[in-house]
Amino acid sequence: MTLDADACFRALATHDARFDGRFYVGVSTTGIYCRPVCNVRTPRRENCRFFGSAAAAEARGFRPCLRCRPELAPGHAAIDASSRLAQGAVDLIESGVMDEGGAARLAERVGVSDRHLRRVFDAEFGVSPVEYAQTHRLLLAKRLLTDTSLPVTDVALASGFSSVRRFNALFRERYRMAPVQLRRRAAGASSDGLDFELAYRPPYDFDALLGFLRDRAVAGIESADETSYSRTLAIRRGAQLHTGRVTVRHRARRRALAVRLSPSLARVVPAVLGKVRHAFDLAADPGEIGAALGSLASASPGLRVPGTFDGFELAVRAIVGQQVSVKAARTLLGRLVAAHGAAIEAPDAGTARLFPAAAAMAALAPAELARIGLVASRARAVHALASAVDAGALSLEPGADVEATMRALTALPGIGDWTASYVAMRALRWPDAFLAGDLVVKRELGAATAARAEAASVAWRPWRAYAVMHLWRRA
């Protein structure tokens, strides 16, 4: 990543939140690196070094600021192929892939050679995948030590370290202190949950995103009110399935989301937080998007694209929702969860099941799926989707090849261009996904055909997914 040092220093001097997470500044006189929004006295220009990632700063010997906490900085959306490849690999690192198989496994998951992935990572972040993963583990451990009351041993394991001895040694080497020196109980932390904050770049229209999720909340796995969203989820780590609940609220003054996890999710904290970031579109840059959309975005410049906690679940929702109202789709999905979703222990009886896994649905006959009220063609489509995902022939997670995934989706029975584009928009997190055939989109654009809507959308590239959200909201 090429950085303009003068532009970076101007952003640092003004504490410009638009650049939070886009670069970090290392101060040679202190050996510490900060976010551009850090509220300490601005260092002298000649003492500043600028880095495109926290990992690059740490690789040059800088340690993280305890005040602005670089581990809390928002991420950034990927547009071009190389950036998407790098960000897809980062998503996998954050979900723990390298804890299980190293760099070779990571390269295999993103579909490139180990050597090519190293080149892309160096260009995007200034470090190798291994160095990036190491910094990620350390920053996560720092966060867990600061924000939770987890024992140090649990912090080490949750952060991806194979041994407490290795964790202690690397922490001391990199941060020049022992983990116990950072240990403190954060304000508001409690024994019945793990509390975190995830930052975003303002403005952020949380009410609109929450309303979108609330209207589509499925009984048994989700609940939402005027201020919060809560759901169950399951994450597999090795042979063990970790299940629990996540609740999200808005902290507008802190420009962050407050996230609470069940204690049962302690070993998979990075994966859960990654899913929250995607579901609530925290990597978006409203300034960059607004510049591309112009007047279309002026009424709600903080509007985001709702993501999902699970790509397979989102694709099933899209199929079930074909040609029926949102309310009817919720009813059908609620029946699906009640009939086939695994029950888990939860303090809230309203969120006591998991969405059915692909393997479970693939094992059912289409006729069994149809019993919840699905028409036969949609039951066959859901079954075909579940079978493809269960077999590993289809990945519906952020970072997957968009064009290849959309082709694979439309090759399945009962899945057309609209559904494939909707999955690309919300599950694959493709910011340029555009639902040209959507009736509301065509009406708002005054386009009689999908081809004309597509032509009218060209000026909004590469942020057409956000244009769709604005068109829907305008309607």
Image: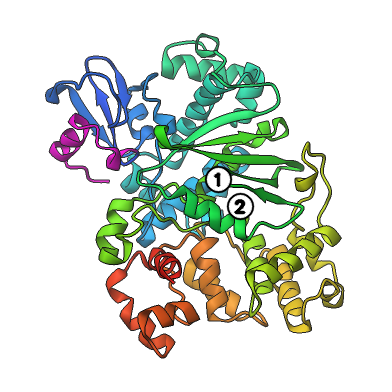
Residue 446 position within the rendered picture, expressed as x and y whole percent measured from the top left: 36, 84
Which comes sooner in the sequence, label 1 or label 2?
Answer: 1
Residue furthest front as drawn: 226
Disc ID at residue 276: 1
The answer to whether marks 1 and 2 mark residues whose Cβ atoms lie closer than 8 Å is yes
Q: Which of 454/388 is in front?
A: 454
Secondary structure of the residue carrying tag 2 is loop
Q: Considering the whole magenta stretch, tell me its main secondary structure.
A: helix
Q: Please indicate whether residue 298 sits to the left or right of residue 100 in the image.
A: left
Q: Quadrant of residue 461?
A: bottom left
Amino acid carrying mark 2 in the image: Phe
Residue 3 covered by magenta stretch: yes
Residue 29 position within the rendered picture, expressed as x and y whole percent measured from the top left: 22, 15
Residue 450 position within the rendered picture, expressed as x and y whole percent measured from the top left: 43, 86
Cα–Cα gap, marks 1 and 2: 7 Å
Residue 388 appears in the picture as rendered? no
Residue at horizontal 46%, vertical 75%?
435
Label 2 crowd (10 A; few <14 / some 14-19 / many >=20): many
Amino acid carrying mark 1 in the image: Val
Q: Which of 162/271 is in front?
A: 271
Residue 32 position within the rendered picture, expressed as x and y whole percent measured from the top left: 31, 20
Residue 31 covered by magenta stretch: no
Over which residues does the magenta segment extend? 1-20
Q: Is residue 231 above or below residue 426?
A: above
Q: Is residue 171 above or below residue 211?
A: above
Q: Please indicate whether residue 328 sits to the left or right of residue 434 in the image.
A: right
The C terminus - image quarter: bottom left
